[in-house]
Amino acid sequence: MIDLLFKNAIILSDNQARPIFKSNSLGINQGKIAVLNRKTLPAKKIIDLKGKMVIPGLINCHTHAAMNAFRGLADDLPLKIWLEKHIWPTEKKLLSPAFVKKWTKQACAEMATGGTTCFSDMYFFEEWASKAARQFGLRMVAGEAILDLRPESLELTKNLLESRSEPLTTISIAPHSTYSVGEERLIQAKALADKYNVKLTIHAAETKNEQNDVSYLNKIGILDENTILIHAIWVNDREIDILAKKQVKIVHCPQSNMKLASGIAPIAKMLQAGITVGLGTDGAASNNSLDMFREMKAAALLAKVSALDPTVLTAKTVFEMATINAAKVLGLEQETGSLEFGKSADFAILDFKKPHLTPVYDYFSHLVYACEASDVVATYVAGKKIYQDDRSKFS
């Protein structure tokens, strides 16, 4: 007898061979997916999901979660002024372990209500941020922001790596950027990532002032299959070839990029070159939301209008950037990112009876172009319910 069975659901597995299962069952046992078919097996609890859709949990590949505290603090400004005149001075005054834990927990609540089950974070006091995520029940990749102005940050990262043991928490090495971290510390950070076989994630080529980032990072030996570049807007065709050959992963943050007027990342070209791309919201101070449904729609529309081609970046491709390809970016594809037998039961349940989701001709189209975070009625991570809309009619 399994722990929990959902029946009569529309299930989007994100499996290439058969992505949509109608009137189907999803069974959970010990936090893993144990049933994914038309069968109804004995279970300790059975829930009828007629009219509901189950999707893989959305994965936010780049956040600064505790920056939820700064949402709306300094809008309509260029990146340099936004950072140096507003964000960094405010952080200097307010940051503490308790502050980070409190606001990370608030960010977790926001993400869970929108169907996000995993996020990759780069910020300060990440030991406390990861505690907040674990207490809430969200899967997290924790990266202590490494900067030259915070020489202790590399040591804090080492401490995180040496103490890691929680099943829902993965550690990354997170140098902030090429303009805030010198060559010596960047090389040290990469050596640490190689030693522990973890991802290195860094803001790169975000503004026109950073348009040589890819060539520079390649020259000093930072780029390989375990490197994740966030933004990667100002890259040329030669650098895209480098990224593809080195199997570097990319995180696209379209709404933050638009709001800060940083530019438009050549995502379609990257995908054509075979580069794995995931989606991220960036922090709420530069977005101003952690809503992955908004991010998916923005990614699709921005690519189309910038190319003057409506066929660029289809809904299915964008949805994969928020699920299975996002998991590949973070190195978690064996655990999460799709609904498959034996994987962790990380998923969201959406109400597809709402007027704006009726009728349905293409589920991927609705998920990217029509769905809203408020359509999520429940979110599960490792088989545990971490969010349920009080108005929903199942339990």
Image (tube, rainbow, N blue to C red):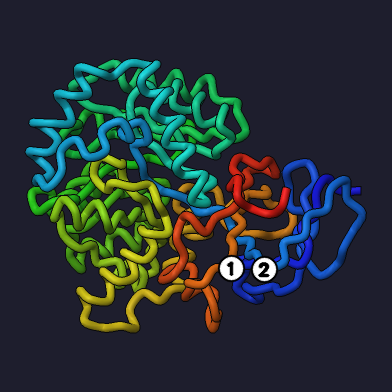
Horizontal relation, residue 78 to residue 390: left or right: left
Q: Quadrant of residue 337?
A: bottom right
Residue 327 visible: no
Q: Residue at x 48, y 72 (%)?
A: 356
Horizontal relation, residue 381 to residue 121: left or right: right
Pinpoint residue 207: horizontal percent, then vertical percent: 13, 51
- The relative height of residue 158 versus residue 246 in the rendered view (above or below) is above
Q: Badge 1: how crowded within 10 Å, few (<14), some, or many (20+)?
A: many
Say which residue label 2 marks. Answer: 51
Q: Secondary structure at mark 1?
A: loop
Q: Amino acid at mark 2?
A: Gly
Residue 372 visible: yes
Q: Secondary structure at mark 2?
A: loop
Q: Quadrant of residue 369?
A: bottom left
In depth, the one of 50 and 203 nearer the eye is: 50
Q: Residue at x 9, y 46 (%)?
A: 78
- The relative height of residue 97 versus residue 293 in the rendered view (above or below) is above
Pinpoint residue 101: horizontal percent, then vertical percent: 42, 23
Q: Residue at x 92, y 54 (%)?
A: 42
Q: Quadrant of residue 250?
A: bottom left
Say which residue label 1 marks. Answer: 352
Pinpoint residue 110: horizontal percent, then vertical percent: 44, 42
- The relative height of residue 145 versus residue 211 in the rendered view (above or below) is above
Q: Are marks 1 and 2 in contact (CB under 8 Å)?
A: yes
In depth, the one of 74 and 388 nearer the eye is: 388
Q: Residue at x 15, y 54 (%)?
A: 262
Pinpoint residue 124: horizontal percent, then vertical percent: 33, 25
Instruction: Give the Cα distance between marks 1 and 2.
Output: 6 Å
Q: Amino acid at mark 1?
A: Phe
